Every structure is written in structure tokens, then in C-alpha cells.
Image (spheres, rainbow, N blue to C red):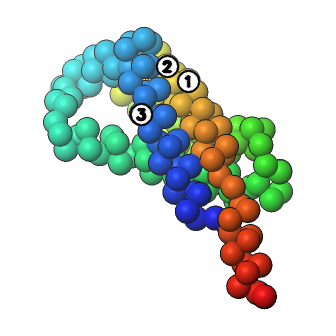
Amino acid sequence: MNYKRIVLGGLAAGALMIVLDMVGQGALGVGQQWQDALVALGKPMHLTGGLMAMFFINYFLRGLMLVLIYAAIRPRFGAGPTTAVRAALGFWIAMAVFPAIVNLSFGLFPVRTVATMGIEALVEMIFGALLGGWLYKEEAANQSRAVAAS
């Protein structure tokens, strides 16, 4: 695996997912739904610099994981957008669907909020994986191995 390209693709994927999240927060009203749910729990969210930093770190780590998964499954499924979408779907199930089931079972958040956030996360992860997968190339890693072997 070409770890430099995983980092490059992962950071780009994370940045794209941040932008898509910001669009989704406004356009889909997810931000207001989330804030309303937290107020109902007596835990209103106060956006601080530290909290924003954690959101950004979270998205960059998600981007890195998406591209790492893409790179790992690429030998089996081949390079390209279909494999990137497979990586995104697998990661989405682990990072959004399973936690959503738990959140819904506790009854802490409205179904609409959890569903909207889950759909938004799926869109973010698919586009993030497509960008990260497009930037990921193994040629550089293979060429350096060939040079080292000679």
C-alpha cells in the first residue's frame, strides 16, 4: 500500500466531508435537528474552538480510514469508483448504522434526526471515498519496491 497516497487521499476526503457536512447542516436542517434534540436532553451544544477542532480531527480520521479501507480492498475488487463505494458502505455501516441502532434503542434522539444524519453521513462517505480513491495510486509504491529490489 502507498501510505503517502493514503494520507493525501484521506486528508482530501476529510476536507470534502467537512464541506458536505456544513452544507448538510444548513440545507437539510440537520444542525437544528441535532441542537433541538440536545436541548430536549438538557445538554445544549455550545460551539467552542475545542469542539470544532474535534469535529475537524474526526473528519480527517474518517477520511484516512476510508482511503485505508479502499486501499486494502482494492486488490480484491479492483481500482475504481465501485470499490470506493464499497469501502464507503462498509465504513458507513460500522460508523453510522450500528451507532444509530443503539441511539434509537435508548430513545434519546428522534428517529427523523437519526435517519437524516445517517443519510447525510452516507452521502459524505461516498463522495469522500470517491475522491480519496481517485487520489490513491499504488504505482509510486510499486516503483520504489522495484528499484529497491534491483
- Would you say 55 lies left or right of 45 here? right
Q: Are marks 2 and 1 in contact (CB under 8 Å)?
A: yes
Q: How many marks?
A: 3
Residue 110, percent from left and from top: 41, 19
- Would you say 53 lies left or right of 99 here? left
Alpha carbon separation for disc pair 3 and 1: 15 Å
Residue 44, percent from left and from top: 19, 26
**Taking 57 as reference, is 93 above or below it?**
above
Q: Earlier in the sequence, mark 2 or mark 3?
A: 3
- Would you say 57 lies left or right of 74 here? left
Alpha carbon separation for disc pair 2 and 1: 5 Å
Say the numbered circle drawn on residue 116.
2
Give whichever of 142, 102 is nearer the camera. 142
- Which quadrant would residue 26 be assigned to in this image? top left
Say the numbered circle drawn on residue 119.
1
Say the numbered circle drawn on residue 18.
3
Q: Residues within 10 Å of mark 2 (few under 14, many from 20)?
A: some
Give whichever of 66, 133 is nearer the camera. 133
